[in-house]
Amino acid sequence: MGGTFKRVEKKYLLTKEQAHELFAELGDRAVMDAYGLHTVCNIYYDTEFHELVRRSIDKPMYKEKLRLRSYGVPTEDSGVYLELKKKWKGTVYKRRAEMPMHTAREYLELGVYPAEYDCQILKEIDYALHFYPLQPSLFLAYDREAYDLVGHDNVRFTIDRRIRSREEELDLLAGDEGEPLFDEDIRVLELKAPVALPKWFVSLLSELQIYPNSFSKYGSVYKEKNHQIHNMIE
């Protein structure tokens, strides 16, 4: 569903073996949520000169990003999400509007404003699209497992693997294949809570030598591709 989310997020890089150790320690304190294992597909929007991702890499106090997201490869009639994600002093604010894929395509590619889905969130998204202005920049997908922490309301964590991207065919309908960012063994864990992260869970991660990492999937792909270009020039 669409809506507004405010929460604290912390990211960690870990190996497949560390993930197994984590679940062994958690036992029945973590349960897979209703989404289970699924694939998240995104089109990130940026300016012609990638101003949003370059600003994000500099780690400012405030940053924002806009993306079109689907869960799995959509059809023209599938529900997709236009998301405006902002981060201020470590707190994440996510605002998203849901609509059918064909409606999102007409809006983003042809400029046909989806009046039937008009709301304050969509107005903010429309403002961001035209203020910068924004255009499709990167397709990025990953396979995600989502879990709830038992006894902690609205505290959850996700584990992402097979992070992959492409700069061609910037269309969610074109499938979820792309160039891998990491070795198959690497995972990204995101811990998410409405106010504060559970201290016992953070301590457990530290005991397993799983440490916080200021990590952005889109930013990491951008840095990797620019590093490759730099090496080619030299």
Image (tube, grey):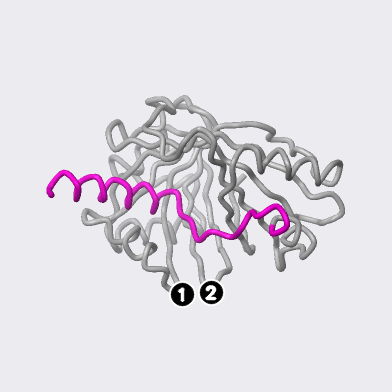
Question: Marks 2 and 1: in contact by CB < 8 Å?
Answer: yes
Mark 1 is surrounded, within 10 Å at the Cα level, by few (under 14), some (14 to 19) or many (20 or more) other residues, namely: few
Residue at image mark 2: 89
Q: Position of residue 207 (x, y in %)?
A: 73, 57
Q: Report whether 194 appears left or right of 67.
A: right
**What residue type is disc 2 on?**
Lys
Q: Relative to 170, is 202 above or below? A: below
Q: Which residue range is magenta in the image?
A: 206-234
Reply above or below: 118 against 76.
below
Q: Nearer the viewer, residue 43 or 110?
A: 43
Q: Secondary structure at mark 1?
A: loop
Q: Which residue is mark 1?
A: 61
Q: Is residue 36 above or below residue 203?
A: above
Secondary structure at numbered mark 2: loop
36 to the left or right of 175: right
Indicate the position of residue 92 as horizontal and vertical percent values.
56, 63
Camera-side residue of 187 and 85? 187
Name the residue: 28% across, 48% down.
135
Q: Could you tell me which residue is drawn at 61 percent across and 60 percent down?
A: 9
